[in-house]
Amino acid sequence: MAAPAADTPTDVVEFLVGQHDQIKDLFAETLKATGKDRKEPFIKLRRLLAVHETAEEEIVHPRAKRKLPNGRDVVAARLEEEHDAKKVLAQLEKLDVSSQEFTTELSKFRDAVVQHAEKEEKQEFAKLQKELSSEERERMGRAAKLAQAIAPTRPHAGVESQVANLMAGPFAAMLDRARDVITGKR
C-alpha cells in the first residue's frame, strides 16, 4: 500500500474515519476469502492498521490529551486497546491464514477493532472536530498522512506513545519496509 493519496480528505477526522471504513472492508475481504487467498488481504489489513495507529498515536492522541476535557483518560483507554490490538495482530501473523483458528481469532479481533474505532470516533474524533478549527484539523491531517508515509508496516506492541513512536518508529519502519521488500509482502 502506497502513501495516502493526495485526493484523500485532509481534515484529520475525515481522513481517519475514512480509514476506519477501509479497515472494516479489509476485515470483510479477509474473512470472505478462503485458504491461501486470505494472505494478500490480511497483509493489506495489517499494514493499514499499523500505519493508521501510528498516525493516531503521533498526531491525534497528544492533541486530544491537551484539548479535550478528560482527554488523558480517553487517550489512555485507547492506547491500552491499541497495545492489546498490536499483540493480537502479531499473534495472527504467526497463524496459518487458511486455518480455522485464524478465522476464529480474526473474527474476534475484528469485533474488538470495530468497537475501538467507534469509541475513537465518539469520544475523541467528534470532540476534536468541535474543539479544533478546520485549519487545525487540516494541518493535523497533513501531519497524519506524513506520519503514515514513514510509519512501521507491522505491529510493534509497546510503541503506543508519541515519544515512543518518534524514537523507535523510524528504525521499526526501516526494518519493516526492508522485510516487506525482501518477502515481497508490500
Image: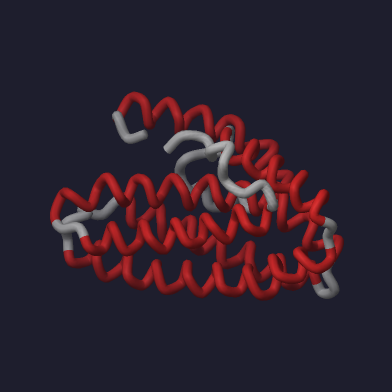
Residue 19 vs residue 108: left or right?
right
- The image shows residue 89 at horizontal and vertical percentages of 41, 56
Colouring method of the image = secondary structure
Going 15% across and 58% down the picture, which residue do you hit? Answer: 34
Going 71% across and 41% down the picture, which residue do you hit? Answer: 143
Asked which quadrant contains residue 127, the reply is: bottom right
For the residue pair 128 and 81, the one nearer the viewer reads as: 128
- The image shows residue 83 at horizontal and vertical percentages of 55, 59
Residue lying at the far front of the rendered structure: 7
Going 63% across and 62% down the picture, which residue do you hit? Answer: 79
Q: Is residue 64 above or below residue 47?
A: below
Residue 40 vs residue 83: left or right?
left
Q: Quadrant of the N terminus?
A: top left
Asked which quadrant contains residue 111, the reply is: bottom left
Residue 38 vs residue 17: left or right?
left
Q: Is residue 114 above or below residue 38?
A: below
Q: Quadrant of the C terminus?
A: top left
Residue lying at the far left of the rendered structure: 35
Going 29% across and 58% down the picture, which residue do you hit? Answer: 29
- The image shows residue 66 at horizontal and vertical percentages of 86, 61
For the residue pair 88 and 185, the one nearer the viewer reads as: 185
